[in-house]
Amino acid sequence: MLLLEAGGDPRELHGGVRWDEKRKSLPDDYDVPVFHGISTESDAIRWDFWVRHYADAAQQKRDPKYKEEWDGERVDGVLYPRTGALGGCTAHNAMILVYPHNKDWDDLAELTGDPSWKADNMRKYFQRMENCHYRNFPIPWRWIYNLFRWNPTRHGFRGWLSTQVAVPLRALKKDKKLLKVIVASAVKAATIPDMLLKRLWWLLLGRLDPNDWRLVKDDAVGIRLPPLTTSGHARNGTREFLLAVQREHPGKLTIELNALVTKVLFDDKNRAIGVEYLKGEKIYQAHARPSDLPGERRTVRASREVILAGGAFNTPQLLMLSGIGPKDELRKHGIDVRVALPGVGENLQDRYEVGVVNRMKENWKVLEGARFARGDPQFQEWEQNRSGVYSTNGAVLAVIKKSDKSRPLPDLFCFAVVGKFRGYEPNYSKEIVVHHDYLTWAVLKAHTENRAGTVKLRSADPRERPEINFHYFEEGSKGYQEDLDSVVNGVAFVLGTTAHFQNLIAEQAAPRKGEDLRQFVKDNAWGHHASCTCKIGRKDDPMAVLDNNFRVYGTQGLRVVDASVFPRIPGFFIVSSIYMIAEKAADAILADAGRTFS
């Protein structure tokens, strides 16, 4: 098997830049959980996309994160960080792993008519991949699990992806003011009258775990601690899994880095027989410092099939460059139409997120002396004991709730972050490093109704970024009013949790209610879970791109397995669903090859 990756290895790349020093390599930025913000702005691995949230220029320019130009380039959009590196965006994400809602899978099973997509069956893929370290059985009781496989949480304990919960209790105890704020916010959230007894039961049963199967089945709400994909409280993900497979099965997996795939190759029967790619570093123009060199053009042949995993932006771009997509879009750029699939690049979706930023009168003691660099006190604690605030991603508390009682599922995930974060914009991570007196409540709205976003080609040049517009809250788009009401509800909720703060500086930009609050949400919303641009669907759906086994309609030997495959964006944080569909796709690929998973 050959894996082609457009970037390099994020732990070995050279040339990354920190705010106060040039770095030789990136292992700290990659490994240390709290450095994830810094890693998104590392020149070594970052891919910067500039997206539009609105077609209306006047509304778009109201977003304080909007840039018309940046670094000498006309960008006309809002920064959307991606990663060109082994492991993709798992090399820089915030590592949160929250299980989707069962209805997300059951709806997909109904849509496709394929019962293997049902929620109960999909849970086995989560168990297969997970190696849970925060709900494992105490040693005296492990014989019960080993003998009877009694596992009411339905966590996995033998998979490739390590999960942990990092709460810096020792560090928080040193910071009584922060601890007081967290406790007060938790009490405020926990004492919401609605379903009080039920939420207390979930709290006792699940022990703040959003991924406990019993809570998942109940679509539970309440206070949670977000699990992280860390091992020994250091980042781990697909990079580590791929390298482990390569070590354990020499000769079975070849990984070629710095290889930007530009086109899928087909025979006369529309069977994918290989790909064309450019060999070279920093070839794609989204790279922070793109190369002026064109790269060496190469081709590689596939003995069985080609699998695309470029994500919600790059996979539809690659399909269109290969002649698969909307006819008018392809012809506009002089690309011969091989398979007319109008759904390619359509249906783009995301979560809406808003950061409610609070500045405190004093610095947090937990960040005293922090430089977010090797050698500071917090780094030493992490390096020596794998504990303290650097073992976290900065989030200290989360609340899952419904924006309205009528919602069929919980749709708000609100979490407190020690730091200043209003969304992605150039140099945003510098604000986190420099300022130690902020607490941000991030409001994430799931199960969005808006499906009007698009990914379109700018040209037939495979090195050029596509044109991306999410069409936020635009009148005429389905459900925009419901989405806006939900986010406003979430912002109002977190404003209520901070109203009691005694040491808050009057710097709150969010208005408290009314049309001003609605406009604040429209002006400041952002997202980072782009998905759904090559959706799975029935063959009679003209906008479907893939069948229930990830195969591209109108072709043979070609699949897509990434965030683009979902018809509707699932759950709160999409990475858990992507890992699960990858496991499911492995079964489908092996079945077509006449083999089974072992």
Image (tube, rainbow, N blue to C red):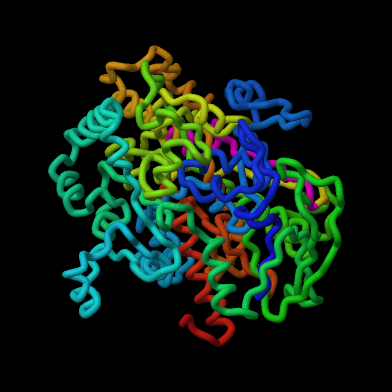
Magenta span contains residue 464: yes
Q: Which residues are magenta?
A: 462-482
Is the residue 534 above or below the residue 36 in the image? below
Is the residue 487 above or below the residue 409 in the image? above
- At 23% from the left edge and 53% from the top edge, which residue is drawn? 206
- At 59% from the left edge and 39% from the top edge, which residue is drawn? 470
Apparent side of residue 547 relative to residue 405 in the rendered image (left or right): right
Is the residue 437 above or below the residue 352 in the image? above
| Quarter of the N terminus within the rendering | bottom right
- Percent across and percent down for residue 201 are 15, 49
- Percent across and percent down for residue 392 are 40, 44
Magenta span contains residue 112: no
User: In the orientation shown, which residue stands out farthest toward the bottom?
Assistant: 594
- Percent across and percent down for residue 360 are 37, 19
Q: Is residue 294 at all visible to an observer of this figure?
A: yes
Give the main secondary structure, helix, strand or loop, of the magenta stretch.
loop
Q: Quadrant of residue 279?
A: bottom right
